[in-house]
Image (cartoon, grey):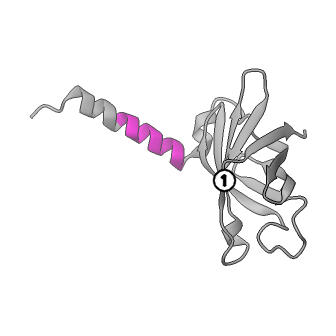
């Protein structure tokens, strides 16, 4: 029984996507991940103007909200970051607030790099993120 070419192509595309998710570094294997480095992130939320440091390495990184209340167990310290999807022009992250304490909720962050080098972002609540490289 012959397998239709479209089915083979769909299976190959699915396998490629799964490989990218399983091995985030694979998408930049030929060059350096353009998102690796230290970033300043700003946004306006329900508490007003907010700011965080985002430090990304080849394997993950951390997020630290700078103006969080000191007694906030969810965001007053460095919070680990997990890569969900990595490309040469975009990256999707999960800020793992849930590892800080039971009841803390994770947050998704999507960053896009433009041809001129600018980076913008969007957080899982719809907040636009102003992103500036620090180094």
Q: Which residue is mark 1?
A: 125
Query: What kind of secondary structure does the magenta stretch mostly adopt?
Result: helix
> How far across and how far down the image is residue 81, in percent?
70, 56
Q: Residue at x 39, y 34 (%)?
A: 13
Q: Vertical placement of 98 versus 95: above or below? A: below
The image shows residue 94 at horizontal and vertical percentages of 65, 55
Indicate left or right for 48 with 104 as reference: right
State whether residue 35 is above or below residue 73: above
Q: Is residue 83 above or below residue 102?
A: above
Picture quarter with the N terminus: top left
Q: Between 81 and 130, which is closer to the camera in this rendering?
A: 130
Compared across the picture, whether 46 is left or right of 21 comes to right
Residue 130 sits in which quadrant? top right
Q: Residue at x 82, y 42 (%)?
A: 37
- SS at badge 1: loop
Image position of 81 with respect to 5: above or below: below
Q: Residue furthest top?
A: 116
The stretch of residues the image draws in magenta is 12-22
| 68 vs 35, nearest the viewer | 68
Q: Position of residue 2 (x, y in %)?
A: 13, 31
Q: Residue 134, image x and y in percent?
A: 90, 40
Label 1: few (<14), some or many (≥20) within 10 Å?
Answer: few
The stretch drawn in magenta includes residue 36: no
**Quarter the C terminus occupies:** top right
Look at 71% across and 66% down and name the residue there.
Answer: 97
Residue nearer the viewer, 130 or 1 = 130
**Magenta span includes 13:** yes
> Looking at the image, which residue is at 26% across and 28% down?
6
């Amino acid at each position: 029984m012959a397998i239709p070419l479209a089915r083979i192509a769909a299976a190959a595309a699915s396998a490629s996507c799964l490989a990218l998710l399983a091995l985030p570094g694979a998408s930049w294997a030929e060059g350096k991940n353009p998102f690796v480095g230290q970033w300043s992130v700003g946004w306006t939320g329900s508490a007003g103007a907010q700011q965080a440091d985002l430090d990304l390495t080849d394997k993950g990184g951390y997020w630290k909200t700078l103006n969080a209340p000191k007694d906030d167990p969810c965001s007053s310290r460095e919070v680990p970051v997990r890569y969900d999807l990595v490309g040469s022009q975009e990256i999707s992250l999960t800020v793992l607030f849930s590892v800080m304490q039971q009841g803390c909720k994770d947050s998704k962050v999507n960053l896009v790099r433009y041809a001129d080098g600018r980076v913008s972002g969007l957080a899982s609540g719809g907040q636009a993120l102003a992103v500036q490289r620090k180094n």
